Image (spheres, helix red, strand yellow):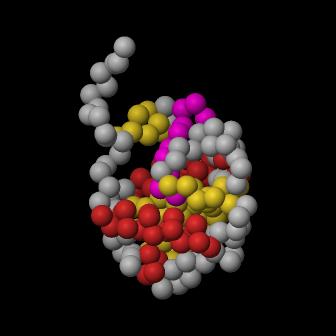
Amino acid sequence: MRRDTGVDDGERLELIDGDLVLMPSKLNRHEVFKNHLARAFHRLLPADAEAWVQSTLYLRPKDAPDPDVMVFPTGRSIEELAPQEVHLVVEVADTTLRRDLGVRATLYARFQVQEYWVIDVQAPRLFVHRRPSGEVWADIRAIGPDEPIAPLAFPEAAIRLADLER
C-alpha cells in the first residue's frame, strides 16, 4: 500500500532531524561542479578511498542526508559506515547555501564527520569546515576559486574550484 505524501515521483527528499525535507531541483552549475569534483577525486584519491555521488549517509534513524559527494574508506558498506569514518562530505550550493552552511554544517559536526566543504557555485568559493566540536566546527575558512585545497586525510588530492567549472 502506498501512502500519499503529496510528493510527485522523481522529487528528492532527505530525512533531517526526523522531518522529510523536499530538496530543490538541481541547476546546471550545481551538476557541473558536483560531477567534475567527483571525477577529480576518482583520479586523485588513493586506492583505499572512494568518492561517491548522491549517496545516503545514515547518521541515525532520524537523520539520513544525501550529500553531493562523500569520501570514505574503500570496502565499507554505506549502511554500516560510521559518520566519524567519513573523511569528507561536500555539498554543492546553488540555491541552498544558507541551509548548507547552517543546518547541514551543524548536523555533520554533531556526528563528527571529519571534514565538510560547501561549494558556493554563485561566487564561486569554497567554505572549508574542519575539526568538529560538538555541533560547531573549530576551523572554518573560505577558499577562493584559484586557491588549491585538499582534504586533510588526502593532501595529495588538491583541487581548485576554477578547474571544476570547465
Q: Is residue 93 left or right of residue 60?
A: left
| Residue 89 rendering spot, x and y as whole percentages | 57, 57
Q: Is residue 129 left or right of residue 46?
A: left
Asked if one can make out residue 127 in the rendered structure from this viewpoint, the answer is no
Instruction: Single out the residue that lies furthest toward the top.
Output: 1
Q: Quadrant of residue 87?
A: bottom right
User: Residue shown at 45%/69% (left/top)?
Assistant: 36
Magenta segment's dominant SS is loop
- Report the front residue among 38 and 159: 38
Q: Is residue 62 magenta?
A: yes
Residues in magenta?
59-69
Image quarter hosting the C terminus: bottom left
Tell me if residue 152 comes above or below residue 80 in the rendering: below
User: Residue shown at 45%/80% (left/top)?
Assistant: 163
Image quarter hosting the N terminus: top left
| Residue 128 rendering spot, x and y as whole percentages | 56, 68
User: Residue shown at 54%/32% (left/top)?
Assistant: 62
Q: Is residue 16 magenta?
A: no
Q: Is residue 115 left or right of residue 12?
A: right
